[in-house]
Image: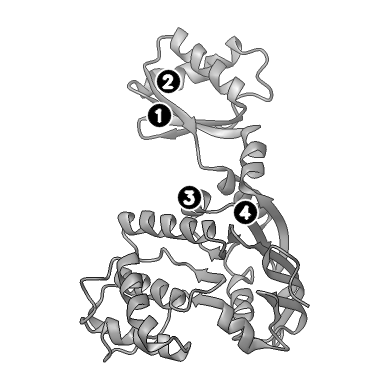
């Protein structure tokens, strides 16, 4: 029997122990086809262990894991043929050229010779390495190696894609290109799971987020729902041409906002401004009006952080 319709990955009650260390404690995860799912958690939460199990490189101690409908215990080979895997750090064959490197993996996946050359050309163009096919892999920059890793993971057109810190070492333009690539793959029906510490990047890429901590799933949300929940009360950053006048006005602005409860919250000074809150959008608008009325030259007012960042900070609050 295949996985439930629409799920590229289904993990239920997954546990894994390394000696006395319990890395995973009954973790659950679903990754639908056609969506990008973000895997978020602090160091030591079990993200890498989970990804290695999904990639069939570790066996789960307990629980059930299916990748593209294939049980990773009963038929790991079928799961591997259906997935593309890009680890955080991966070994490269230094003496091979970029072209030879991808040819090696194309052969390993059994691509027909006539289709192989066409597929590699397309991948090199996709990851912007089309000018480096003859360059030795060891001569590539870290960012170029990351892009080569993405190409390697896609060489056999996988239905499920696993990426661990894919944006590490990428310059801003390459990160934008990676974001667009992952969105395009999801639009084509691929189930994409991305683990990263760059929360702002994940928020722009992901449709869903799975929060993990201490080896367990502590939350699974659609990004749209997370954003709506975060709108209720968030921190706000205020920029002003006169920081002293802003600081003085913030101590009095509460008098102009009798409905502001429980107040401005902790006020933190920043270069060129301050951070206050948490406030709702209505309260922030009222605060802005009060500051302008008091003659404060406000140049900007915007939420501090993001919905995903707020959820992550709330999850890790007990670790402080």
Whole-Å distance between the Cαs marked 2 and 1? 7 Å
Element class at badge 4: strand
140 lies left or right of 54: left
Identify residue for label 3.
200
Whole-Å distance between the Cαs marked 2 and 3? 28 Å
Q: Residue at x 37, y 71 (%)?
A: 146
155 lies left or right of 41: left
Q: Residues within 10 Å of mark 3 (few under 14, many from 20)?
A: some
Identify residue for label 2.
246
Element class at badge 2: helix
Label placed on residue 104:
none
97 lies left or right of 155: left
Q: Residues within 10 Å of mark 2 (few under 14, many from 20)?
A: many
- Is 217 situated above or below 51? above
Identify residue for label 4.
208
Q: Earlier in the sequence, mark 3 or mark 4?
A: 3
List the single residue furthest toward the front.
114
Q: Give how far across and how far down residue 35 sits, in percent.
A: 59, 57
Q: Is residue 54 visible?
A: yes
The answer to whether the residues at label 2 and label 1 have Cβ atoms under 8 Å apart is yes
Q: Residue at x 44, y 12 (%)?
A: 292
Identify residue for label 1.
273
Q: Earlier in the sequence, mark 1 or mark 4?
A: 4
Q: Residues within 10 Å of mark 1 (few under 14, many from 20)?
A: many
Closer to us: mark 3 or mark 4?
A: 4
Whole-Å distance between the Cαs marked 3 and 4? 14 Å
Q: Earlier in the sequence, mark 2 or mark 1?
A: 2
């Amino acid at each position: 029997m295949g996985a439930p319709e629409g799920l590229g990955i289904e993990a239920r009650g997954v546990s894994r122990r390394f000696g006395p260390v319990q890395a995973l404690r009954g973790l659950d995860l679903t990754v639908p086809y056609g969506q990008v799912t973000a895997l978020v958690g602090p160091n030591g939460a079990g993200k890498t262990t989970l990804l290695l199990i999904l990639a069939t490189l570790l066996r789960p101690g307990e629980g059930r894991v299916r990748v593209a409908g294939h049980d990773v215990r009963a038929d790991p080979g079928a799961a591997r043929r259906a997935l593309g895997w890009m680890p955080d750090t991966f070994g490269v064959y230094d003496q091979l050229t970029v072209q030879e490197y991808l040819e090696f993996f194309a052969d390993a996946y059994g691509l027909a010779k006539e289709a192989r050359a066409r597929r590699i050309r397309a991948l090199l163009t996709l990851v912007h390495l089309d000018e480096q096919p003859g360059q030795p892999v060891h001569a590539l920059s870290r960012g170029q190696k990351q892009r080569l890793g993405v190409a390697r993971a896609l060489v056999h057109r996988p239905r499920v894609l696993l990426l661990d810190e894919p944006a590490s070492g990428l310059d801003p333009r390459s990160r934008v290109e990676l974001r667009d690539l992952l969105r395009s793959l999801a639009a084509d029906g691929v189930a994409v799971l991305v683990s990263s510490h760059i929360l702002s990047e994940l928020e722009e890429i992901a449709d869903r987020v799975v929060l993990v901590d201490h080896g367990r799933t502590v939350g699974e949300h659609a990004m749209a729902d997370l954003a709506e929940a975060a709108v209720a009360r968030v921190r706000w950053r205020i920029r002003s041409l006169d920081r002293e006048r802003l600081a003085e006005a913030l101590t009095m602005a509460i008098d102009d906002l009798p409905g502001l409860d429980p107040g401005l919250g902790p006020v933190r000074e920043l270069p060129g401004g301050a951070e206050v809150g948490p406030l709702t959008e209505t309260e922030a608008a009222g605060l802005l009006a009060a500051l302008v009325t008091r003659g404060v030259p406000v140049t900007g007012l915007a939420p501090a952080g993001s919905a995903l960042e707020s959820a992550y900070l709330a999850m890790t609050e007990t670790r402080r």
